[in-house]
Every structure is written in structure tokens, then in C-alpha cells.
Image: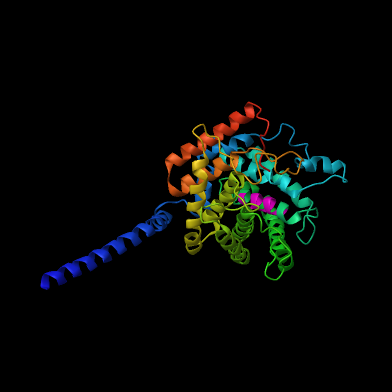
Amino acid sequence: MKTSLNKSNSRNEMKKITTITFSLLLLMPLLALHAADKALPNMGVAGNFAFETSNFMKETAHAAHAAPPADWRTRSGALRLNVNWETNKSLSWFIEDQQLGGEYVAAGVALGNKEVIRWGLKVIEWGFAQMETNGLFNHRDCYHSASFFIESTAHGLLLLEASPWRAGFANQVTSLKSKLLMAARWMVRPDIHELNWPDTNKFPHLIGERRYCHRRYLDAAAIGEAGVLCRDQGLIDKSVWFIREGIAFQRADGVNPEKGGSDHHYQALGLMYACRYYQIVAEDAVRAEMRPMLDKGFAWLIPRVKPDGSVDATGNARTGFGQEKARNGKPKGLEYRFTSISLGHWAQLTQNATLETTARRVFEADQSMRKRGVEMTWDGY
């Protein structure tokens, strides 16, 4: 009887040990993340500055903006569709076409080129010159278009303020911050939010932005980064709503749905914005909520990278096969740049050198595709 009791106790102890061990295994990624937060300088604006100025980014994404246009001093700052709109107001313009200003600022900071920074700021200033006094950019699809410009501008200015050239651009940045704050606050006005993110229980006939998962992370990054830059806690608090909406929208298989399906381009784009938010804006508690989504999102995306660096577009709901057209009327084709950036950023955040190698392979495949003139290449905007 005593022997039987000992065996029973032994089995119970083993069950307890197994349960504790399994629980610890589940918690290990999160525990490791918090340890990394404390041990590594890769969170907050300083962490993002380290990523954006890394060799990976200088040799990939920022290389395309290594120099401003030769005639940048005489140009107005308008880009893409907005160039023709300046002389023919019957044409369409979109504030999102000015998002390259923030990218130029980021590249100039990373590459140590003040001329690139100046050109980027000129592009941003052109954009704000079109803004109305209430923060509205008055054209069709103004909310979604503004989110790209606000995010890129906030991101670029955060990097500039963290750089050695902060003092030299201080007056310009201060002026731009006041305008950026106005635009970000327009996005979170209750009437604007309800129109674009309607409560489907109250308004079942309205959809707004809800079909697109990546827009949750784009909007969170736009509002959250503007909040960090302008020290507006109200914007930061409101940005958390979008993050939680994105987490809840993710499918069990890791897909962040776009129009009811999967799409590698928009999966990568959303993850890029989510990584920026995770690093720059989120506090520990929100990072803990985001981590499972990021793990599953990248676990879905990474296996789609082929050995040659190209990305399997099979099943894409929106891009790669002419399903949709971009603002310029051309099909949304193949684009790997955002896949490369998001993989490279996740590599930094998780200290995964192998994943950075994969990210470089994806970038090289994108460059090769463009040099070969593949018909369905796309710049991703």
C-alpha cells in the first residue's frame, strides 16, 4: 500500500513538473523578449535609430535615396501625381505621394547626407502647404492617403531629432511638428474615426477601412509616432485601439487578412508598420499583446521566401496578378521591398542574423527583377 502511494505521489509530482516545464516553454519567447528589452538598446526611438542606420538598411532600402534629384533646389517638392496636379488642378492629387519625403529624411540621416535631408524636408513642406487649417488634405480617399504621409513624416522627423544634425534643422522640424500634430489630431476626431472605422454593430451597411488589416497597423504607427514626436499622450493612447483591432483581426494561421484573403505584400507592409510601433511607441504591456501576432505573422510570411529571394505570391488577394490598380492606373504587381524591410527589422528585434540574410536575399531578388524588366514589377505605393 505504501509503495502504491509513493508511486501515485511520484506520478503527481511528475505531472506538476511537466506542467510547469510546458508553461515555461510557452513563456520563454516572451521572457526572452523582456530580457532583450532591458539588456539591448533596441527599443524606443534609439533602437529604431540603430536599425535605420544599420548596414542592412544603408545597403538596401536607403540606397535608393542616397542622393536627391539633381535639380532638387529648383523643384517645388511635389512628387509623382502631384507634379502634374500643380499645373492642372482638374487632375487628381494624393498626399500619400509625398510620403517619400520622410523616406528621404531617414536615408539622409542614415547615410550622413544633409542634402538628402533637405530635399526630404522640402517634399514634406510641400505636402503640408496643401493642408487645410483643420488638418484635412482635401481630396478623395483623404483619410487613408493622409495616414501614409503622417506616418512617414513622423518617422523621418523622429530619426532626424535623434541624429547629430538635430540642432541644424531644429527650426524647420519645430514648424513641421505643429502641422503634423494638426493632421494627426484630424485623424482621431470622433466624426472622422467613426466614418472610416465604423462600429459595424451600429452601422452594418458601412465597411470603411475594416477590410484591410494592414491599415490598422499603418494608422497605429501614424498616430502613435506622431504622439511620440509631439509628446501627445492622447494620440499614443488612441493608437492602442488600432493595435488591438489588428491583433483581433488576425487569423489563426497567422494571416493578417486583406479583403477576406491573404496577400504577401500587404502582410509585409502591415508587419513593417507593426514593427515600428512595437519598437518606438508601445510600452511593455502592449508589446506583450503584440508579440504573438508578430510571431504568427512572420511565421506565415517567412516560408513564402524562395531560395532565390523571390516571394511566392500564390493566393494573393490584391497584388501580383492585376487584381487591383494603383493610384497611377497601373496594376498592383510584384513588390518585395517591404518584405525585405519587415524581415530585416524583425531580425534586429529578435537578434536573428539568419533572418537578416534572408531579408538581404529578398532585396536582391527585387533589384534583379527590376533590372530584368519583369512586366509586373511595382513600386508598392
Horizontal side of residue 90 vs 56, given as left or right: right
- Of residue 251 and residue 123, the one placed in the foreground of this image is 251
Q: Is residue 350 magenta?
A: no
Q: What colouring style does the render use?
A: rainbow
Q: Quadrant of the N terminus?
A: bottom left
Magenta-colored span: 146-155
- Of residue 167 and residue 272, the one placed in the foreground of this image is 272
- Of residue 342 and residue 300, the one placed in the foreground of this image is 300
Horizontal side of residue 22 vs 338, given as left or right: left
Q: Quadrant of the C terminus?
A: top right
Q: Residue at x 11, y 73 (%)?
A: 2
Horizontal side of residue 54 vs 146, given as left or right: left
Horizontal side of residue 219 vs 49, given as left or right: right
Q: Position of residue 60 (x, y in %)?
A: 56, 36
Q: Residue at x 56, y 32 (%)?
A: 365
Residue 303 vs 146, above or below: the answer is above
Q: Residue furthest top?
A: 372
Q: Is residue 278 visible?
A: yes
Q: Is residue 112 visible?
A: no
- Of residue 92 and residue 112, the one placed in the foreground of this image is 92
Q: Position of residue 133 (x, y in %)?
A: 79, 60
Q: Position of residue 266 (x, y in %)?
A: 61, 47
